[in-house]
Image (tube, grey):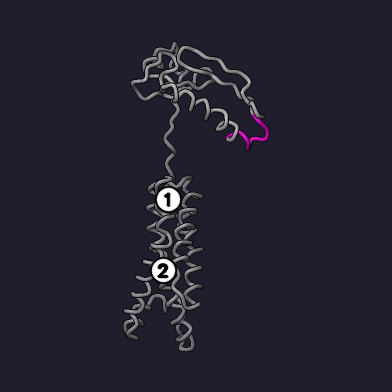
Amino acid sequence: MDNPVSKIQTYMYMCVVWIPEPQPEPMIPDILNRTIGPIIDHLAEYNYISGCDKCGNSSEVLNCCEIDGGYHFQCSKCANALPNYSQAVSINTKPAKSNFIAGLVGAFFGSLIGCAAWILIYKLGYIAGIAGAITAICSMKGYELLGGRLDKKGVVGSVIIMLIMIFVANKAAWTWDAYDSLKDYGWSFAELFQELNYILEESDLMGRYIADLAIGYVLTAIASFRTIIAAFHAS
């Protein structure tokens, strides 16, 4: 395990290193990093640069091609010169696009967890930015689970879902308070949710309602800003 390299063979424009597959499989990344890292550092120290493994051309972006079951980095000229170019299938290194619609559905369901936390914390008499951060994290995780991967449009879509659902959660929390006061007069929760704006205006509470929502958005931004930016850069 201390010396995982079983064979090294050098050619004009490349060096091939053989590493037996380690067991268990979770150790593979660590073995590769410990083995390949020093080799790359050594080559860089002596001013070696990346180039076509057949002709040494370093003036263009190389294509990672599969040739006879092995992977090679070749320039376009060498790849096109193969007897049968179909043997060199360029590997698409661009990450697969996410399924935007399915991702938004996942973000919606994920955001429900944050909404529940928002309402419960509000019922305790607080406006907590941590609930907004939970909404952001769960929205992005939900997008990733159903959308396939969290790309930049996924982060943006998740943030939009988060903002909408925080509005809904705040309205639901206020509706709950109204329901506790008016349920004995025959009002249902659904009716109060629909008529909340009218009730707030008649009760001169609209200003406080808007202030609570604004404070919630500010606290959410403070609590979740780093998480959102990190997810955006990682995507």
Alpha carbon separation for disc pair 2 and 1: 26 Å
Q: Name the residue nearer the viewer: 33 or 118.
A: 33
Q: Is residue 80 above or below residue 213?
A: above
- Residue 28 part of the magenta-drawn span: yes
Q: Name the residue nearer the viewer: 69 or 15.
A: 15
Residue at the (64%, 35%) spot, across then down: 25
Q: Which quadrant is home to the C terminus?
A: top left
- Residue 194 part of the magenta-drawn span: no
The range drawn in magenta is 22-29
Q: Are marks 2 and 1 in contact (CB under 8 Å)?
A: no
Which of the 4 image quadrants contains residue 61?
top left
Q: Give the label on residue 230, or none.
A: 1
Q: Name the residue nearer the viewer: 144 or 230.
A: 230
- In this image, 27 relative to 14: left or right? right
Depth-wise, is mark 2 or mark 1 nearer the camera? 1
State whether the magenta stretch is mostly helix, strand or loop.
Answer: helix
- In this image, 197 relative to 133: left or right? left
Q: Give the label on residue 203, or none.
A: none
Q: Does the rendering let one see residue 89?
A: no
